[in-house]
Image: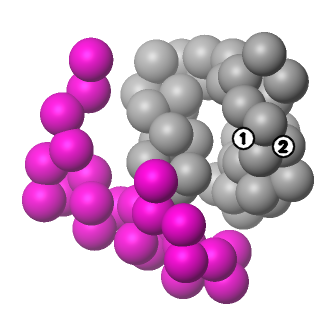
Amino acid sequence: MLPLTEAAAKAAAHLCQENHSSDVVDASVVLASIAYEDAPILTDDLGDIRSLAACANRKRIRVERP
């Protein structure tokens, strides 16, 4: 588990700004994936998560439906 610290929340907000997004939860999921060596993400929100991962220069992150 990765705690949502103030620094992590700010990083998620920054990623949202860069991606012109407002979903800090999705951004936090992408940042957690990065923290765990680009762990795969299972989601029904493929478009937003893929967009955030690409914005973070992490095109290697697998994003799939559960």
From the viewer's perspective, tell me whether residue 19 is left or right of residue 1.
right
46 is within the stretch colored magenta: no
> Is any atom of residue 50 visible in this view?
no
Number of other residues with Cα within 10 Å of mark 2, as a class: few under 14, some 14 to 19, many 20 or more: few
The region drawn magenta spans 1-25
Q: CA distance from mark 1 to mark 2?
A: 14 Å
**Is 4 displayed left or right of 64 in the figure?**
left
Image position of 18 with respect to 7: above or below: below
Q: Is residue 37 left or right of residue 64?
A: left
Looking at the rendered image, the quarter that the N terminus falls into is: top left
Do residues under tags 1 and 2 come within 8 Å of each other at their CB atoms? no
Image quadrant assignment for residue 2: top left
Sequence-first disc among 1 and 2? 2
Give me the residue at 27% from left, 60% from top: 9
Residue 18 percent location from the top left of the image? 61, 78
Residue 29 position, x and y percent, is: 50, 40
Residue designated by label 2 = 46
Q: Secondary structure at mark 2?
A: helix
Residue 3 appears in view:
yes
Residue 6, placed above or below residue 63: below
Q: Please tell me which residue is depicted at 78% across the width and 16% down the height of the picture.
A: 66
Q: Which mark is residue 22?
A: none
Q: Residue 58: give its label.
A: 1
Q: Is residue 30 above or below residue 60?
A: below
Q: Which is the main secondary structure of the residues drawn in magenta?
A: helix
2 in the magenta segment: yes
Residue at 46%, 53% (x, y): give it: 25
- Please tell me whether mark 1 or mark 2 is closer to you in this view: 2
Q: Position of residue 63 (x, y in %)?
A: 80, 29
Q: Nearer the viewer, residue 44 or 30?
A: 44
* Location of residue 54 with respect to 30 vertically, above or below: below
**Nearer to me, 57 or 23:** 23
